């Protein structure tokens, strides 16, 4: 009776989320030049026992995205995790570097009716992609995605829907024009182009589109590709490389989603996840440094609680988490927001100033 009562009370005030993002692994088999993963202090898979503690809270969302700072397909429990989410009637997706999509893996993903398989690209030529996404190989990825297309056809399966996630750099922008043709050939339903908003060193700083003089030209090209994609019935989503000069709302939908780190910590976004910390060389941790507006700045970790210790409802309704969301709530007017201090974790984040021309 007591447990039933606790469960009942927990539903009162529970969040209504568009998605829950779960970091199932912080290990990776690649070494992309822009990724902080090699610096992380905690490289591990999420244990299935911890994942099971999240399952009751899947009731608060329809989509579970199994993604963090690592490669999800490395976690041997990934299929069991997908199965557990599907058993609850949830849509499930994840992003992969595309290198581990063997015949057996693709068959299992199709049989589990995984809804979204997003594959990261950083170029449409092998030379460009492989140079940026080191440790991956575009030819191998394309071979694997041809396999996905074939197996879906053989099994008469509509899922997983293939999405291509293209990270835009100054050095790979010219190849973006080819992405519509590649997506159509591979049977992709969507192409999502994003800006590099976490810049790990000064060399990469000039690669971010919003730090370039040619910003307006980039916008024109993106608009033209979007038009071409529309004619091909392909969803083409992109974030504009424009910058505002002041923090406003976060573009990451943090009022209707949350991130569970590989150790169970609940954060608003992957950029505030405690996973994004490095060791201080002794026994402690220190924030990772990135480059923001031409200066080194810390990524301040921010956890509002651990799913192993508290319910998601309890964590979601904590005063400090509520206040954090208020700052980013798009329904609150700019005048009100100007009266609030920018949260420390967001003060040096491009995600609340990038995206408008
Ligand atoms: S603005 Fe804040 S909440 Fe949004 S992505 Fe950046 S750190 Fe996360």
Image: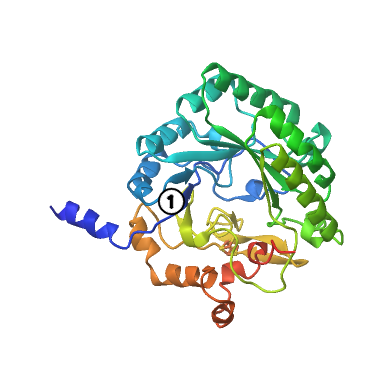
Residue 280 occupies which quadrant of the picture?
bottom right
Q: Position of residue 175 (x, y in %)?
A: 82, 41
Q: Is 238 located above or below residue 248 in the figure?
A: above
Q: Quadrant of ligand 1?
A: bottom right
Q: Residues within 10 Å of mark 1 (few under 14, many from 20)?
A: many
**Structure colour scheme:** rainbow
Q: Is residue 313 above or below residue 110?
A: below
Q: Position of residue 51 (x, y in %)?
A: 40, 43
Q: Position of residue 76 (x, y in %)?
A: 48, 31
Q: Is mark 1 within 8 Å of ligand 1?
A: no
Q: Residue at coordinates 74% horizontally, 37% vertically from top-left?
A: 180
| Residue sitting at x 38%, y 53% | 307
Residue 288 visible in the current orientation: yes
Image quarter of residue 235:
top right
Q: How many marks?
A: 1
Q: Quadrant of the C terminus?
A: bottom right
Q: Is residue 251 left or right of residue 127?
A: left
| Disc 1 target residue | 264
Q: Is residue 323 above or below residue 147?
A: below
Residue sitting farthest toward the front? 231
129 horizontally vs 304: left or right: right
User: What's the residue at 54%, 48% (across, down)?
Assistant: 42
Q: Residue furthest top?
A: 154
Res. 141 in view: no
Residue 3 lies, in percent from the top left, at: 18, 52
Tell which of 90 and 303 is nearer to you: 90
Q: Which residue occupies 68% across, 28% down?
A: 186
For label 1, the SS is loop
Q: Nearer the viewer, residue 39 or 191?
A: 191
């Amino acid at each position: 009776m007591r447990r039933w009562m606790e469960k009942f009370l927990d539903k009162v005030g529970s969040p209504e989320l568009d998605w829950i993002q779960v970091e199932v692994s912080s290990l990776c088999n690649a070494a992309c030049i822009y990724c902080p993963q090699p610096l992380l202090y905690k490289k591990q898979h999420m244990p299935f026992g911890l994942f099971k503690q999240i399952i009751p809270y899947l009731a608060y969302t329809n989509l579970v995205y199994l993604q963090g700072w690592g490669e999800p397909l490395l976690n041997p429990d990934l299929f069991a995790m997908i199965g557990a989410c599907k058993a609850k009637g949830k849509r499930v997706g994840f992003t992969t570097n595309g290198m581990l999509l063997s015949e057996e893996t693709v068959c299992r993903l199709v049989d589990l009716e995984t809804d979204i398989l997003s594959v990261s690209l950083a170029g449409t030529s092998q030379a460009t992609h492989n140079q940026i996404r080191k440790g991956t190989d575009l030819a191998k990825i394309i071979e694997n995605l041809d396999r996905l297309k074939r197996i879906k056809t053989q099994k008469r399966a509509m899922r997983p829907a293939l999405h291509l996630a293209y990270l835009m750099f100054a050095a790979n922008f010219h190849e973006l024009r080819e992405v519509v043709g590649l997506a159509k050939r591979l049977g992709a339903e969507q192409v999502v182009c994003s800006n590099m908003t976490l810049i790990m060193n000064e060399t990469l700083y000039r690669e971010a589109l919003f730090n370039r003089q040619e910003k307006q030209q980039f916008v024109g090209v993106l608009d033209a590709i979007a038009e071409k994609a529309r004619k091909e019935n392909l969803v083409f989503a992109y974030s504009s490389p424009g910058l505002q000069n002041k923090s406003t709302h976060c573009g990451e939908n943090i009022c209707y989603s949350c991130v569970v780190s590989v150790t169970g910590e609940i954060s608003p976004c992957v950029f505030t996840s405690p996973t994004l910390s490095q060791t201080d060389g002794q026994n402690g941790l220190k924030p990772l440094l990135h480059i923001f507006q031409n200066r080194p700045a810390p990524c301040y970790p921010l956890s509002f609680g651990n799913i192993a210790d508290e319910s998601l409802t309890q964590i979601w309704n904590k005063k400090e988490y509520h206040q954090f969301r208020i700052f980013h709530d798009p329904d609150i007017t700019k005048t009100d927001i100007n009266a609030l201090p920018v949260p420390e974790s967001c003060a040096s984040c491009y995600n609340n100033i990038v995206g408008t021309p």
